[in-house]
Image: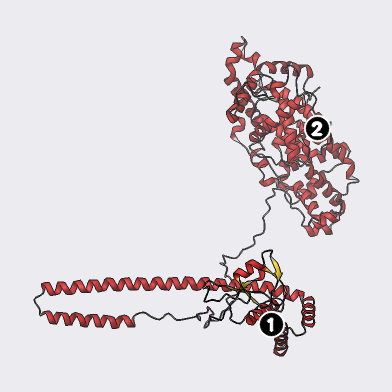
Amino acid sequence: MDDQACPRCKTTKYRNPSLKLMVNVCGHTLCESCVDLLFLKGSGACPECMVPLRRNNFRVQLFEDPMVEKEVDIRRRILRDYNKREEDFASLDEYNDYLEEIENIVYNLCNNIEIIETNKRIEAYKRDNREVIQRNKTRVGREEYALEEMLELERIQEEARKKELEDLDLVHKKKKAHDKQALIEELMYSGKDAAQIVTEFAEKAEKQRLEEKNLPPPKPANEFSTGIKFGQTADHTLLSVPKSEEGPLFVYEPLLAFSEGPGVPPISDIESKGYISHIRPETLQENAGGFTSSLACQRALQEAFQCLFYTAPSVGTSTVI
Amino acid sequence: MYPVSSQKRSWTFANESQLASFRVEQNTKYIEQHEAEARANNCEVDDYFLTPAEERLLLKRYEIHLADFCGRFDPPMPKCVVGTAFHYFKRFYLNNTPMDYHPKEILATCVFVACKIEEFNVSINQFVNNIKGDRNKATDIVLSNELLLIGQLNFYLTIHNPFRPIEGFIIDIKTRSNMQNPERLRPHIDSFIDATFYTDACLLHTPSQIGLAAVLHAASKEQENLDSYVTELLFVAARDKLPALIDAVRKIRIMVKQYQPPDRDQVKAIEKKLDRCRNQANNPVSELYKERLRRLYTDEDDIPADDASFHIADVSSDTSAMNISQ
């Protein structure tokens, strides 16, 4: 621990307990104050390898070996593009080849082997697989979201459990106090032997404790602590198809035209008996809207015939003037 | 569907005396309400107010104006608008008297509403361009009367005109009867239908009966006989209903035949009388009307009365705005 030191200002953890070592993409460490000092303008060169760095890219060093930090950094960057998954491959072998290639690239970049060549390979891969990369990026986002949801669920469950325990505790305490009170009262007012009463109560308490041990029925666990469900393995990403409430079936009742007049020929007669030839044919636009000339023809006939039988109702009020 | 329409249910009446009784009732009601005015003017009630007969003459005159107005309308309006406007006009004066609402105002409103209902699209500006006189004032009158009219029609606005039944009969005659060239009936049919508009036929008979009457009338004018078409084709399955139809057709034809246009001079005298006895609260040039309107507006908007300026108040009172007739 105490050999953790800033390579530039030589401060150690021992001398400055609040020392924070930072690391950038090149994998060389610097302490926080040195970063502040050197990268005042936002960017500059690494004092050890002279690689141009940005200040934003500095982050706190988590691992003791800065090379690990560097690898983590590179791996993260590579995996952002190499985000294919097993489902994207036809066979397991292909997937394994792909994983090996990633490892190769990471190793090369970490150890400065064929950097230019490797970068070219990455570029080519990015170009060829742009669509897949984009798609998988959004998929990852969705997965993260689901994970968050799971965590939230777990937190709620945790709280509920805590509350349950607290409630149980409270009940216990109350009961204990009650028992004690009963014992004292028994001792005070009954004429029995005090020692006998005490042993009686002690036995009772013992029995209760045994009962309680048996009491809480263990809830049947249906998921691991990670939130992955087992048992009834309904795929929880798919909602079950909602069952709709079905009322009585619709029954078609033909419309009874109340016409008070001679019957109108049906559409088939209008077309076959020559009514249709006395009306202009519908235009293409009208036909697209569902109108046919036979409909118009039938309507005209219908309006002509209906209520021909009509006679005025004989109203008594008509004579009143 | 006419058989289930409000027109059949509420606006088709038994006979002419029933219509007359409505009109007389409106007339007496108005006179009862405004009797004091006659006494204030030192007049006999009969001399001061219009009699039911005078009202009829006046309205007949304005029906002619209505037809003229529609005929000269620009852009030319389809027939069904005219028919609908006539229906509205007749219905309105069944439940109102011309002394309450001047026919020249209701006339324009009827046509305007009919244009809307029959989907003959004219804007109010286009509409008032057909009216001689002050257009702003006409706009005001038409728009302010529109709701009144619709309310008086009991919001029953769908009108079944006889035009589509006539088309149906012509199709049927062409198809089933052996009459030569039924198209030559059309001019006679049109003139007959125009003539029915001046009568009360549309309040007493169904559009199909009126249509058939028009077709039969036109056939007789062309020296054709369609009786066999009616008896052997139309009523072949219901011979017992034939007398009722013959009666209805006869009544419609008599009504058209007996129609007499009102005498101009007589109507002029009636109009003069009307100017005195009309309800001043509904007269846009009267002080009473302006006062009423002003109160209406100030109540609604809390505007002080003397600040409010209206179209109607701007118009000089001696120009008659709705000069449709002359």
Chain assignment, label 2: B
Amino acid on which the number 1 mark rests in the picture: Glu
Of residue B263 and residue B281, the one placed in the foreground of this image is: B281
Question: In the image, is A276 to the left or to the right of A59?
Answer: right
> What span is colored magenta in the figure?
A224-230
In the rendered image, which residue does mark 2 sit on? B70
Q: Is residue A160 magenta?
A: no
> How much space separates mark 2 and mark 1, taking CA atoms?
78 Å
Q: Mark 1 belongs to which subunit?
A: A
Q: Which residue is farthest bottom?
A: A93
The main secondary structure of the magenta stretch is loop
Residue B201 visible in image: no
Percent across and percent down for residue B98 are 68, 24
**Which colouring convention does the figure follow?**
secondary structure
Name which quarter of the figure residue B214 lies in: top right
Instruction: Give the percent coordinates (x, y) of residue B312.
Output: 70, 23
Q: Please tell me in which quadrant of the rendered image residue A140 appears.
A: bottom right
Residue identifier under label 1: A87
- A162 and A260: which one is in front? A162
Q: Mark 1 and mark 2 in contact (Cβ < 8 Å)?
A: no
Q: Is residue A225 magenta?
A: yes
Badge 2: few (under 14), some or many (20 or more) residues near its Cα, within 10 Å?
A: many
In the drawing, what numbered circle is on residue B90?
A: none
The image quarter in which residue B259 lies: top right
B106 vs A80: above or below: above
Quick one: A287 or B200, which is closer to the camera?
A287
Q: Quadrant of the C terminus of chain B?
A: top right
Q: Position of residue B48 (x, y in %)?
A: 65, 14
Relative to A307, residue A187 above or below: below
